[in-house]
Amino acid sequence: MDGSFDSRNALIGLVDEVTRLSGRLKSTFAASRREAGLNESEMMVLNSVVEAQRPPTVAQIGRSMGQPRQIVQRAANSLVAAGLVETAPNPDHKRAVLLRATGKGLALKREADARAEAIAEELTLDLDATRAATLAVRAVRKQLEARLRGDAGAGEDDT
């Protein structure tokens, strides 16, 4: 095979490329995460909490990231114990608390982002193509999220 297999649906090809890209990105930016002293799941949850438009629940993060709720809950518990995330009552649900970053968690995220930014600056990527790819992947994600919710149009992402 010459690597030019393209007789499949474009979305299936995108899934394959995004999966491969995810692995490469995790490897490329692993040092930044390690220096923060967090494992991959903990960093994923901290990122989700900090980047969310509204404080998310564990279940929302799990759905958004395609991770089992139990894995997200363990990571959230570790972050709470480390003082990086705090819980808050959820007016919409008695047991599913909301997660919010603490000042310490925001500071750690900023430091990790600065390290990741330094790594990204070392890469010689076409930034216009990267921005266009980001927008395209985001549009596909929003369409899929809307479909999963049963909405007719693309909706907003909470996490």
Image (spheres, helix red, strand yellow):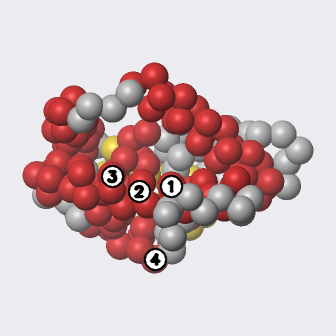
Secondary structure under the numbered disc 2 in the rendered image: helix
Q: Which of marks 1 and 3 is nearer the N terminus?
A: 1
What residue does disc 1 label?
18
Q: Where is residue 28 in the image (x, y as percent from the top left)?
A: 24, 51
Q: Position of residue 25 (x, y in %)?
A: 33, 52
The reply to whether residue 107 is visible in this rendering is no
Farthest-out residue, front: 2
Distance in Å between CA atoms under marks 4 and 3: 24 Å
Please state which of residues 4 and 37 is positioned toward the viewer in this rendering.
Answer: 4
Residue 109 in which image quadrant: top left
Is 76 on the left or on the right of 134, as rendered?
A: left
State yes or no: discs 1 and 2 in contact (Cβ < 8 Å).
Answer: yes
In this rendering, the answer to whether 43 lies above or below 72 is above
In this rendering, the answer to whether 103 lies above or below 27 is above
Distance in Å between CA atoms under marks 1 and 3: 10 Å
The reply to whether residue 127 is visible in this rendering is yes
State yes or no: discs 2 and 3 in contact (Cβ < 8 Å).
Answer: yes
At x 14% / y 53%, what residue is drawn? 31
Farthest-out residue, right: 152
What residue does disc 2 label?
22
Distance in Å between CA atoms under marks 4 and 1: 24 Å
Inspect the image, locate mark 1, and give the three-letter code of the amino acid beneath it. Val
Secondary structure under the numbered disc 1 in the rendered image: helix
